[in-house]
Image (cartoon, rainbow, N blue to C red):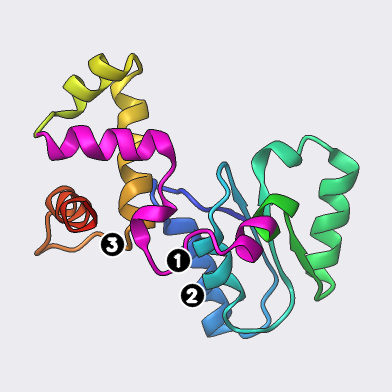
Amino acid sequence: MVDVRMPPSFSNEGLVAAIQARADRPGFPVLVLSQYVEPLYARDLLASGEGAVGYLLKDRVSDVDGFVAAVRQVAGGGTVLDPEVVAGLVSGAGGDRPLERLTEREREVLTLMAEGRSNAAIAARMFFSEKAVGKHTNSIFTKLDLPVAADDNRRVLAVLAWLQGQ
């Protein structure tokens, strides 16, 4: 069981670990928890076509009986997907156009990034904390398929994607 967002960057490290574990041990049971509906993550997780996999939203795990049943189902080789994730997969959310994967709030943050605003300035403008801006920024990087790379500035690459989509 892993959270999608784990240290060090809190973007998609948990998902990457889950996919790697299943690559190393095909069919290895993995249950991924996320705060957001991320159809892209679900597609990546389900890509092998094997069972013993789950993707649940964190707000659903408060139903302890349902959560325990989901864990047992995945451990037994079954597949468990949150209904909202399924709806996102079926509707085609997160399709071929990466900017369409972004929420309205993430688009606002990206627009302010494109205007050259710092995280502090974005936080002040949108009336939330710098930590919240950082979380939105990491989500933007993930949804735009911008992994951490020594030679790349993900903020600049995100703004370039925004400019190309305008």
**Which amino acid type is shown beneath numbered disc 2?**
Gln
Quadrant in the picture for residue 59:
top right
Q: Which residue is mark 3?
A: 147
Asked if marks 2 and 3 touch (Cβ < 8 Å), the reply is: no
> Where residue 103 sits: x, y (%)?
44, 42
Q: Which residue is mark 2?
A: 20
Q: Gap between marks 2 and 3, in whole Å?
A: 15 Å
> Can you say whether 163 is above or below 134 in the image?
below
Of 124 and 61, nearer the camera is 124
Of 60 and 9, nearer the camera is 60
**Residue at left 20%, top 28%?**
119
Q: Gap between marks 2 and 1, in whole Å?
A: 6 Å
Which SS class for mark 3?
Answer: loop
Of 53 and 90, nearer the camera is 90
**Which amino acid type is shown beneath numbered disc 1?**
Val
**Residue at left 21%, top 51%?**
166
Of 9 and 135, nearer the camera is 135
> Can you say whether 99 is above or below 47 in the image?
above
> Where residue 42 sits: x, y (%)?
58, 64
What is the residue that sits farthest to the front in this orientation? 166
Q: Residues within 10 Å of mark 1 (few under 14, many from 20)?
A: some
Q: Is residue 104 magenta?
A: yes
Magenta stretch, overall SS: helix
Can see residue 9? no
Q: Which residue is mark 1?
A: 16
User: Can you say which quadrant of the picture contains the N terminus?
Assistant: bottom right
142 sits to left or right of 33:
left
Report the span colored magenta. Answer: 87-115
Q: Gap between marks 1 and 3, in whole Å?
A: 11 Å
Asked if marks 2 and 1 touch (Cβ < 8 Å), the reply is: yes
